[in-house]
Structures are given as C-alpha cells and as structure tokens.
Amino acid sequence: MPQRVILGVSGGIAAYKAVEVCRRLVDAGLHVVPVLTPSATRFVTPLTFSAVASEPAQTELWNAPVPIPHTRLGQRADLIVIAPATADILARLACGLADDLLSATALATRAPVLVCPAMHTEMWEHPAVQENLATLRRRGVEVVDPDVGALAAGDVGAGRLADPQVIVERVLSLLERHRARPQSSGPSRAGSGASGAPHRDTGRDLRGRRVVVTAGGTREPIDPVRFLSNRSSGKQGHALARTAARRGAAVTLVTAAPFAPADEGIHVLAVETAEEMARATLPAAEQAEVIVMAAAVADYRPKRAAPSKLTRSERVPELELEPTPDILRALVERRRPGQVIVGFAAETGDALGKGMEKFARKGVDLLVVNDVMVAGAGFDHDTNQVALISAAGIEQLPLQTKDAVADAVWDRVVELLAAGDPVPPSAPTDEDPVHGAHPGAVRLGTEHARNAYLGQSIEPEDHR
Ligand code: PMT
C-alpha cells in the first residue's frame, strides 16, 4: 500500500505550484490527499487538486462527510507537507491553533511535518515569521527554505517557493528516513506508515566517513544555447548521496543534474561540464575515504564552443571533438591508502562481460555495472538493476528502487572500508577472477565468470 501524504496548501500566489508538487508526489507512487485552507481556494480551486491527487481535495473542518476529519487525516498520515506555507499558517502552527482543517490536521498527527515557506521578502525577513519558524524547527518540523527570485507583483527577492522537484525530493527522503525509524508510540496507525516496502535498518555504519558522490549527465557546450549530453537524470547518484547521509556520512555531492537533494548532511556542488566536475571532484576527493562516480560524464566535448548562437543561415557546422578529463582515472592515480573508489559502467549488450573487462582495467575497488537496456533500469527510471563486481566476486541484484541499489553499494563499501586498505585489483590472469561471492549474491562460478569475461553468453538463470 502506498504511503499517505497530506499536501497542505495555504493561501499564497505560489499555491499554483502546489499542483505540480501534488502531481509529482502521485507520480512517485504516494497516496496524496490535498488539504486547502480557505485562502488557498481563492488562488487555486479544490477541483484542480482533486483532478491530480489520489483522492478529492478537502477544505472543511465542519461540513465534511466524516465528523472529525482532522483526526483521521492526521493519524493516518505518513507525512504532512505544507507548500506553500504562508506567514499565517506558520504562525498558526507555532501557536498550536486548530480552527481550520489544515492547522487542526497538523496538530492531530505524530507524522513528520515539512513546511515550505513562500511569501514576500519583507514578511519572510520579519522577526515574527523567523521566530515562529525557529519555534517549529525546535519542535522537529522540517523546513525547505524559500529561494531568491521573482515574487508576486513584479518584486524580486527572498521568499519564492522552492522548486517543486526540490520539495518532492525532500518529501521522499523524509519518508525514507521515517520508515527507517518508525514511530514507537501513538494511536494505532494501521494502514498507514507500516505500508510500503520495508526499509532495511542499516544503522549509521558510515558515521564519520567523508564520501564524495558524483551524479547526473554533464553538458558540453556547442554554443551558448546548445550542448552535448546524455540521458542521466541524476536519480541514482542522488539516491547514493541521500542513503549515505542517512547512514551517517558527511557527503559531498557533485551533481550535473538540474535539481539536487536538499537533505541534511549533503554538501552540494552544482556543475555543468566534465571539466567543472573534475575541478570540483578531485579536490573534494583528497579529504574523502570513499568516492563513488555515478555520474554519466561525457567522454567527448566540442573542441571549441561557438561564442554566439549558431544559426540556420550559416553552413552546417562541423563539430570537432576532443576527449574530456577522465576523472575516474585521475582519482585512481591519486588514491590515498585506504581510500575506496567505486566506478559505474553504463553498458548495452553483454553488460557483465564488458563490466568485468572494465573492472580489470580501471583499478577501482568496486564496479557497479548498469545494463541500461533492461526494462525499468538505468537512465531516468526510479528503479535500477545492477551487478556489483569487486575482488570478492560478482553480485547480481534484482530490479529494485534506486535507494535500495544505493544501500547495496554502501553495504559493499562498508565491507571494503572494514577490510582496511583495499588492494587495487590486478589485471585478470588465467586464475579464477571470481571468488567468495558476498552473501545474498547470485553467485557466478568460475566457468560463468570466465565466460562473462570472455564476452560469451551466460545462462539466463545466472543473470537474475
Ligand atoms: O542518473 P540516472 O538517470 O539515475 O541514471 C543512472 C546511470 C545510468 C547514469 C548510472 O547508474 C550509471 O551507470 N553511471 C555511469 C555512466 C557512465 O558514464 O558510464 P561509463 O561506462 O561511460 O563510465 C565509466 C566510469 O567512468 C563512470 O564511473 C564514470 O563516472 C567515469 N567517467 C567517465 C568519463 C569521464 N570523462 N570521466 C569519468 O570519470
């Protein structure tokens, strides 16, 4: 059963963006119940939310079909997110008022509450608002801070609602975190937070570890408006960053994706090109114990980017390409003793064979082989299916969420860290390159592994 999210909408100009938040939460597989304040209905009609949500929008504390709607909504919620959260609703929450459906619901819950403030700069900076927010933070309410940008009536400044994707990523991350540490007390929550895929409690086995994760597809400019890129969304890299932070690591996320997770414990470095990714990753890696290269870094870039937009009236341009910096190679060359380096390989056709060849060549401790031709796996999907190759063996994982894939990668990294200074793998020999597969792995025996290495086919049952 999907997790239940109450999407509270209060009355600000940004209420229209909450429709997009609602749609994306539903797309992410959540059961979304919109609850609008009376002022919110002046900006967007309940019908609009009802059309995209999992059930009709609710607005009434008194004339609802059930007698006490707020307690039902609050008790059954896995999370309450309020976007936009006006100065008024923040004050109501801080004071514990309960005379409309949204504020009453936010009181009648033990679920986590996330507020996404949006208002004019003068209001946002007012001590009353900031003190209310400080009160809420102290009580454990989570906050997605507003952006700086265009506001209502042509004004520009701090107070613009955060991007819907940022809000959605924060909701998903909070739900994951909450599922890992379920509530121990409170009224019966049957049919609520216990639903969804069980989250394996990995504890905080990366506490105190500094990790660098790269994500997204780099963009290599052709001219000021065009670029060469690939289909990477950044989801797998962001899942790695989120799960590492949840397991206690201090994470530096170097991402070329347009939206980055806004979780605690993640320091985001936004980049665009392979060159920028190299400049951000290499210095960060000097301090790190673990580096995971999940980014789809362009292998080639135009030698010269045109200074102005190429037009149709000019002759068809000839693009001369040059190689980009090989970041993974530079990392392996500079590896400090004890540092664990994880590479990814996006492959099509005989993915495992190509992966084994890459593992032998790249000098990484762990290679995550991603057969991007598998349905539901690879670029832009919320799920993924990978094989993990290390000196200890090959582990074929099933199709699962990108968070679950990330946790499996961190499990193997934790083992490598515990093993001390991991010995870089040597070039393959005639000896069996695969031994001692990790428990839970679909174990590939000597013959299969060698066949895979030689690029021959493996029986389908061994690929599961
Ligand atoms: O972002 P998503 O939509 O969630 O999709 C996830 C993914 C498919 C992008 C991810 O799972 C994945 O496979 N990432 C690696 C993609 C890739 O670039 O593979 P590759 O085989 O081309 O590169 C091998 C390794 O070298 C990678 O770790 C890559 O980060 C690194 N590399 C590549 C080129 C370069 N110039 N420098 C590098 O460091």
Image (cartoon, helix red, strand yellow):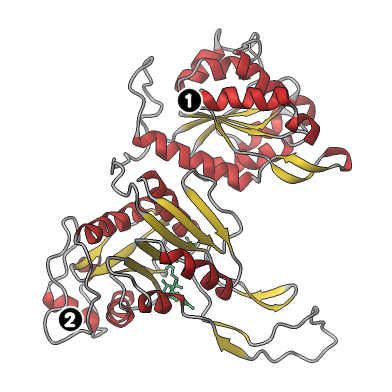
* Residue occupied by mark 2: 450
Q: Please tell me which residue lies in front, 350 or 386.
A: 386
Q: How packed is label 2: few (under 14 Cα within 10 Å), some, or many (20 or more)?
A: many
Q: What is the x, y in percent for residue 26?
A: 54, 40
Image position of 183 (left or right of 86): left
Q: What is the x, y in percent for residue 97?
A: 63, 11
* Residue occupied by mark 1: 77
In primary-sequence order, the first of circles 2 and 1 is: 1
Q: Is residue 141 visible?
A: yes
Labelled pair 2, 1 in contact (Cβ < 8 Å): no
Please determine whether, in this image, residue 418 is positioned above or below residue 373.
above
Q: Quadrant of the C terminus?
A: bottom left
Q: What is the x, y in percent for residue 52?
A: 62, 38
Image position of 279 (left or right of 452): right
Image position of 171 (left or right of 385): right
Q: Picture quarter containing residue 41?
A: top right
Question: At x 28% / y 47%, what residue is drawn?
Answer: 205
In the image, what residue type sits under mark 2? Arg
Could you tell me which secondary element the residue under label 1 belongs to?
loop
Question: At x 37% / y 37%, what residue is drawn?
Answer: 196
Q: Disc 1 beta carbon < 8 A from ligand 1?
A: no
Measure the alpha-carbon separation of dots 2 and 1: 51 Å
